[in-house]
Image (cartoon, grey):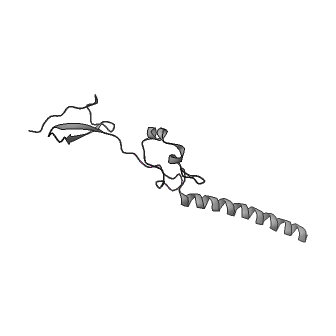
Amino acid sequence: MAQRVTLRTRKSYNTKSARNKVVKTPGGKLVVHNLKKVATAPKCGDCGTALPGVPALRPREYATLSKRQKTVSRAYGGSRCATCTRTRILRAFLIEEAKIVKKVVKSQLAARK
């Protein structure tokens, strides 16, 4: 028959927040280790891929990190991935260029009349 173990916390049900793992000690005794929830990496707001350079932690653990560990030193760092940042900047630049071209064409048409 398997050796019985006592739970370390008062939660007796095997819920998501109260997972347990039975571990054998070097002395041959079985003890219970409480498992924490698995952390997910922060995702890019546009494409949904995991952000490289930002650690995957539980939400409360980010409070103990310094700002440089939570972000990437770039525009939209820690919020958008590098590819999405590049496309955003390029799109904004092309929109501004299109406005300038529109303005120039309008002035040329006005000069012809």
At 54% from the left and 44% from the top, the residue drawn is: 67
Q: Main secondary structure of the magenta part?
A: loop
Give above or below for 38 relative to 47: above
> Where's residue 99, x and y in %?
75, 62
Magenta run includes residue 18: no
Image point 42% across, 42% down: which residue? Answer: 58
Q: Quadrant of the C terminus?
A: bottom right
The magenta span reads 36-48
Name the residue at the front extreme.
27
Give the residue at x 53% y 56%.
81
Q: For residue 46: magenta?
A: yes
* Residue closer to the observer: 9 or 23: 23
Which residue does the image show at 58% across and 57% down from the upper left?
85
Seen from the viewer's position, the closer of residues 60 and 92 is: 60
Quarter of the figure with the N terminus: top left
In this view, which residue lies farthest toward the top?
A: 10
**Nearer-the-camera pick, 112 or 67:** 67
Left or right? Give the position of 56 relative to 76: left
